[in-house]
Amino acid sequence: MPRLPSLVEVGAGPPVLAIHGQPGLGADWAAVAARLARDHLVLAPDRPGYGNSGEDADSLAGNVEALAGLLRRRGLAPATVVAHSYGGAVAVLLAERHPELVSGLVLVASVGQAGSLNRFDRFLALPLVGEILSVGGLYAVGQVLPLVRRRILRAPERSWHWLATSLPDDHYRQVASARREQVWRSFISEQRILLAEIGSVETALAGIRVPTVVVTGTWDVVVPPSVASSLAATIPGAELLLVARTGHFLPRDRPGVVAGAVRRVAVRTGDPVSPREPPGPSGA
């Protein structure tokens, strides 16, 4: 597979910082970035511990400072921040600890409260048990589940298509296979970090003072829609956007919807962009 850059950077205009989940790459945002590039500058870095970041996994606070440093070095603050899943916890802390750097938030299938962590998350954080489960889990993410998803989508019976929306696709072979040992260590480390630091994220929610849209798929079985409802109810003035017949991977399956949410937030912050996102090809 071709070597991916450590930072996806496309477009021109008001800045958007895109934060990927766990495991993940900045390239996860390619479809969303393509829709925003006509009037935004989109930055989507590999977070510490993943891809070509060249770093070990870091705490949520460490992720926050790394991204804050990126925005400052590039002179691109304040930016609209869009974040997926685990990345949502980083985005919340970035907005709370560096409000001068963040003009708006879009939280996509995001964690953010202790209730967003299930029993499996806690098993993955356990010594030895979690390490063994994570080896199998990353193999499944990179090899088994993409195959299962392809077979579900090809089957004439559509009753299981809801499951395919929360399964990784072939892109995750790049995520899980490249630098495999690094990804495994990062995944284990981040599970323990999330359990240890989720309280600080939950506390930060009520202090968010920027326009926020919380986006969730009604078929999400990884971070259920109830978590998004709770986030939107806790962040002052937040808008909740429920996306029907969609699972956890909204940036992949509904990039036009995610881009539209970014545009709505940008308009509310005064950025000179169109509030409407034109329909794109499949997955709009």
Image: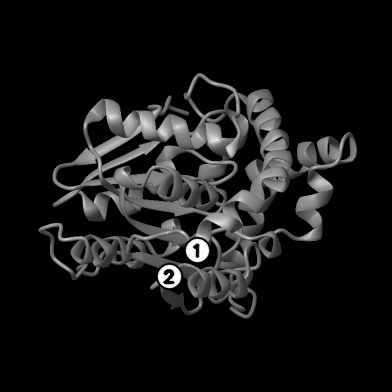
To which quarter of the image does residue 213 belong?
bottom left
Q: Quadrant of the C terminus?
A: bottom left
In what element is the residue under mark 1? loop
Q: Where is residue 164 drawn, in percent x and y?
A: 59, 65
| Residue kind at label 1, given as amino acid type | Ala
Q: Where is residue 2 drawn, in percent x and y?
A: 42, 27
Mark 2 lies on residue: 236
Give the left or right position of residue 141, taking residue 46 as reference: right
Above/below status of 248 relative to 239: above
Q: Residue 206 carries which label?
A: 1
Cβ atoms under marks 2 and 1 closer than 8 Å? yes
| Residue kind at label 2, given as amino acid type | Pro
Q: Which residue is drawn at 79% across and 42% down?
A: 125
To which quarter of the image does residue 178 belong?
top right
Could you tell me if residue 139 is visible in this image?
A: no
Q: Around disc 2, counting alpha carbons within 10 Å, would you say few (fewer than 14), some (14 to 19), or many (20 or more)? A: some
Check the image and name the residue furthest to the left: 272
Check the image and name the residue furthest to the top: 54
Above/below status of 126 relative to 222: above
Q: Which of 161 and 240 is in front in this view?
A: 240
Distance between the alpha carbons at the discs numbered 2 and 1: 6 Å
Q: Residue at x 80, y 51 (%)?
A: 122
Q: Which residue is drawn at 83% across and 41% down?
A: 130
In what element is the residue under mark 2? loop
Give the left or right position of residue 136, taking residue 129 as reference: left
To which quarter of the image does residue 69 belong?
top left
Q: Residue 231 carries which label?
A: none
